Amino acid sequence: MFSKETLQYGRQIASAILGLDALYRQESGDQEGLVVVNMDVGGEVKAQSFASYAEAGQAFTELRDAASLLPEADRRCYYHQLCTSLIAFATWRERGLPFAEQLTRFIHVPAAPASDEELDSLCQQMRTLLTGMGFGGDLAQQCARWEASVRVPADEVPGVIAQLMDEAWDRVEAKLFKIPAPKSDGMRVTCVSGTAFNARCNYLERKVELNTDPVLTRPGLKHLTAHECYPGHYVQFKMRETLARQGQAPADNYLSVVNTAAASVFEGLGDNGLAAIDWIEDDNDRVQALMNRYRSGIGTAAAWRLHALGWKPDRVRDWLRERALVGGEGWVTARMAFISAPARAVLIWSYWWGETVVSRVWRRVAADRRPALLDYLYSRLHSNDSIAMFS
């Protein structure tokens, strides 16, 4: 599947990434770190030691040069961009980096928020769909009435999401491939409050940490099930971990690293999950899909106002609240916490770009080539450019 050169390179870059992560944790006090998931629980890969960010940056410059010699074209592309991301991260910690450059050099997307035209188009599509479903009023009223019609009370959430997880697992195995684990290895939901995320896949503990502060709906929980679990993050982690442990994939498969070129495809595989397992069943799911994209878009616009335009946080919060449409104050609070964290602020763009780059490839590939595409998607990490190289 991978050349011996790439397997060797994967171990080298994984060691360097762990070294940069250790340096960052020590310097910043951020214990979530740069490496947010390390599936190498046995310590197979040892962290390289760096005394400074300059030393780390030099190591990744050399690794970027070495990537150009790898046999696989998609790995040359991905590792070049990954090293560029990590060089930029070291530069940011050492002497700062403008927010626009963080976007272009960390996660390799254009330094611009979702446009007003794109957001207006999503609003119009939602309005047309909701009108056809019988919801009256302006868009805000339509969304409020729709949300009330599909709302799941907090005490019913664990049962609903458990049932959705069970069905999603079965759909992955029926529509995509067999997951290399028994269903008992899968995720369980834990309800939390006061977090900066809507939901998070805590893979190592097999927990989906679900924020119950926002208003929760059945279509929203269905989306989160696909995104965080099956065929999203749990399946991504399980496939990459299994192949790395068997020596069939590079050792950096063990790591989930924020602020890199892999961010958009990682989130996009989750956001494309319902379509991948043919689980978009009715107009409620279609409204939710549009709402997901819209809220990612206004998240980029809010983050841009905060970090690039210098708006005060209260002004950004008010702007976001006026446009949220659903989710209530809990969603606004969580989103503000997410985009306010300096080490995480650019990541909202990975949701905006991710669904687009993944679905574009998914739609153009014929059904008889889907098995090969699935192997390409789940056996390795990808950037927006390397995923597009599948043919």
Image (cartoon, rainbow, N blue to C red):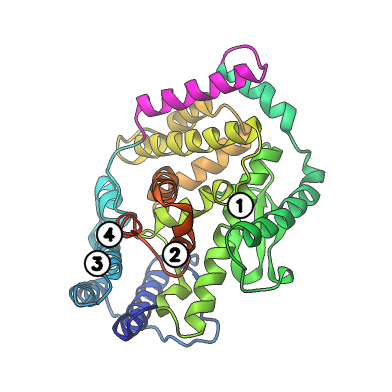
Whether residue 368 is situated above or below residue 292 in the rendered picture: below
Q: Amino acid at mark 3?
A: His
Q: Amino acid at mark 4?
A: Trp
Tell me, yes or no, whether the two marked residues, 2 and 3, touch with CB atoms within 8 Å.
no
Residue that badge 1 annotates: 226
Question: Does label 1 or label 4 sit earlier along the sequence?
Answer: 4
Chain part drawn in magenta: 114-138
Question: Does label 4 or label 2 sit earlier along the sequence?
Answer: 4
Residue 70's spot in the image, x, y percent? 24, 77
Point out which mark residue 12 bears: none
How far apart in space, not on screen, are marks 1 and 3 (Cα)? 30 Å
Tell me, yes or no, whether the two marked residues, 2 and 1, touch with CB atoms within 8 Å.
no
Mark 1 or mark 3, whichever is nearer to me: 1
Question: Does label 2 or label 1 sit earlier along the sequence?
Answer: 1
Residue that badge 2 annotates: 372
Q: Residues within 10 Å of mark 2 (few under 14, many from 20)?
A: few
How far apart in space, not on screen, are marks 2 and 3 (Cα)? 24 Å
How far apart in space, not on screen, are marks 4 and 2 (Cα)? 38 Å
Whether residue 97 is situated above or below residue 146 in the rendered picture: below
220 displayed left or right of 95: right
